[in-house]
Image: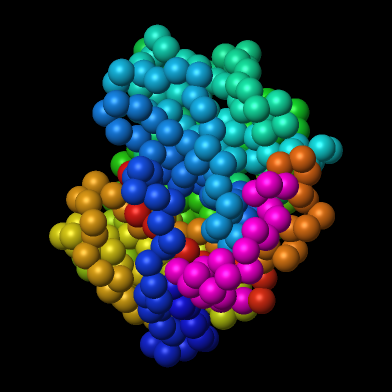
Amino acid sequence: MRVNLQNNVESSCIKREAELISLGDEVDISQVFHCDGLLLCISITKDKTRLVVWNPYWGHKRKIELTHNLQIIDRYMYALGYNKSSKSHKILRFITYWDPNFEEFKIYDFNSDSWRVLDVTPDWTISYINHGVSLKGNAYWFANKKYSKTRRIYHFFLVCFDFTRETFGPLLSLPFEFAVSEDAMSVSSVREEQLAVLYQPWDTLKMEIWITSKIEPNAVSWNSKVFLSVSIKKVIAPQFQFYLGSFFIDEEKKVAVVFDKDYNYRRNIAYIIGLDGSFKAVDLGESAYAMCYPLVNLFCDPCSLENNIGDDDDLRRPRDSSRLLRFNFASSISSKSILSLLESD
């Protein structure tokens, strides 16, 4: 997609450029997780689940064999990250939400080409509808403490999986005091340095975006001033609430772009919102599936990743320079990033 953001929201534009290069007819992508210029693509069917790690810049892909397949709808969460010491990439696969009596955490190491079970006993859950985000080789999600007789309201936090230590950190506080499951929340990365969270409570529908001032697996602090605060009732519609929207921000242009659906849940829309409350909706076309929502990914410039190759460099090396000519599904929004838009369950 071609993105041209301006300080004047009305002058900003987003246009579809071309289709994403196919991974092959045998792969129907259901979920996507981005890290370090690579895409972890998850294909879920009623018969089996398949994983493919793909470098869309060079066109390389690597299929990952799963150790088993559940004969139920797959409600596993997936994340791609890397060990900061060895620079080797890893995949985390876990489930905490589908069945309270069944939890499983496994990690795949690219170097050993094998899965291992992790000893994790969390007192929190992560819903499969909440997409995580990668930052500095680690993965972050919204999590809530487990339901109990004494805890009947879902209070949300951030939680990080550290791919170097292969463990989850403590629950990290959010910049707003109270968040429940009816509220709209989304998390995004900022310049591969900080995290941003979007929060829209169900009752007031006032949307806020906050940016961290420090983020580590075991600690977080937030800027004292909110990046963006706007009344969606006035900007879009009196009863409009984002549902599974993904987003990114441009601090220099003072603009946020939220990708979600329209009021009737039939079309994908990019909502460009300025800090001054200015607003523009860009229609990205009809949604392919009713229950799939647009997911935006900001790609690092692959040329800047050469020092992070590691032993899994079969996904990094250029195989054929002509592949660059086919990598036209996205356009640069800066000298260091590329934007792609996918539909994900």
Residue 43 sits inside the magenta stretch: no
290 and 253: which is toward the camera:
290
**Residue 80 appearing in the image:** yes
Q: In x, y percent, where is residue 102?
A: 42, 12
Instruction: Please tell me which residue is depicted at 51% across the width and 28% down the height of the picture.
Output: 65
Report whether 223 appears left or right of 198: right
Picture layout, residue 291 above or below residue 307: above
State how many labels appear.
Answer: 0
Above or below: residue 247 compared with residue 134: below
Instruction: Give the quarter of the figure containing the C terminus.
Output: top left
Residue at the image point whose x is 58% and y is 52% from the top:
60
Viewer-closest of 5 and 76: 76
Q: Quadrant of residue 71?
A: top left
Quadrant for the N terminus, please. Answer: bottom left
Residue drawn 67% across and 70% down? Answer: 336
Q: Which residues are magenta?
A: 313-334
Check the image and name the residue furthest to the top. Answer: 101
- The residue depicted at 45 percent of the width and 23 percent of the height is 95
Q: Give whichever of 24, 160 is nearer the camera.
A: 24
User: Is 87 left or right of 137, judged from the image as shown?
Assistant: right
Q: Position of residue 35 (x, y in %)?
A: 61, 49
Left or right of 264? Residue 193 is right
Image quarter of residue 139:
top right
Place of residue 119 in the rendered image (x, y in percent of width and height, measured from the top left): 63, 13
Please say whether residue 170 is visible from this viewpoint. Answer: no
